Image (tube, rainbow, N blue to C red):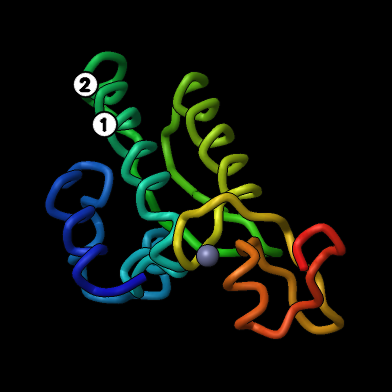
Amino acid sequence: MNEEKQQQLFKEFPVLFRKRNDVIDKKSPYWPIQTGIHCGEGWFEIIHDMCTKLQRLNELENPAEPCKIFQIKEKFGTMSFYTHHASEIQRDVIRAGEMRTCTTCEECGKNAYLRKSKMWIHTLCTEHAKASGYKLEDWET
Ligand SMILES: [Zn+2]
């Protein structure tokens, strides 16, 4: 994800990304998020929506030990979103957000399908699947 979008999230949700500005230390459980958010801009709105809900739940449920994010990345074509101290409702928010990435283009946010080639698996709209060299479904051509 581009630096500008990441900075927007880090500024807007300082508790969720509290460990973001620490020095990268691979012994810290938070080091993956210190290297950034590793997915395309098409999922920005989904992440923003998840963070809004997680932050609100932190305030309501667990201000003393809030949920904090340690990794967000694309994995096998969809988003994996990892936290520490998530409550049961927060885990539901995370699962629902991850599910939305199964049908949302990672590049642009449009309606999309999971695409498979010999080498790769990605969730992409028709336009971005074509641009990335995936074979389109019959109904798309
Ligand atoms: Zn797209």
Please give the label number shown on residue 55: 1
Q: Position of residue 27 (x, y in %)?
A: 41, 70
Q: Quadrant of residue 115?
A: bottom right
- Label 1 Cα neighbours within 10 Å, binned few <14 / some 14-19 / many ≥20: many
> In terms of depth relative to the viewer, which is nearer, 69 or 8?
8
Q: Looking at the image, which residue is at 25% across and 14% down?
A: 60
Tell me: residue 69, above or below residue 71: above
Q: Residue at x 44, y 31 (%)?
A: 86
- The image quarter containing residue 98 is top right
**SS of the residue at dot 2?**
helix
Secondary structure under tag 1 reads helix
Kind of residue at disc 2: Glu
Q: Is mark 2 within 8 Å of ligand 1?
A: no
Q: Residue at x 58, y 35 (%)?
A: 95
Residue, disc 2: 59
Q: Residues within 10 Å of mark 2 (few under 14, many from 20)?
A: few
Please report contact status of discs 2 and 1: CB closer than 8 Å, yes or no.
yes
Indicate the position of residue 117 as horizontal and vertical percent values.
82, 78
Q: Amino acid at mark 1?
A: Gln
Which numbered tag is attached to residue 68? none
- Where 78 falls versus 135 (above or below)? above
Relative depth, front residue between 138 and 32: 138
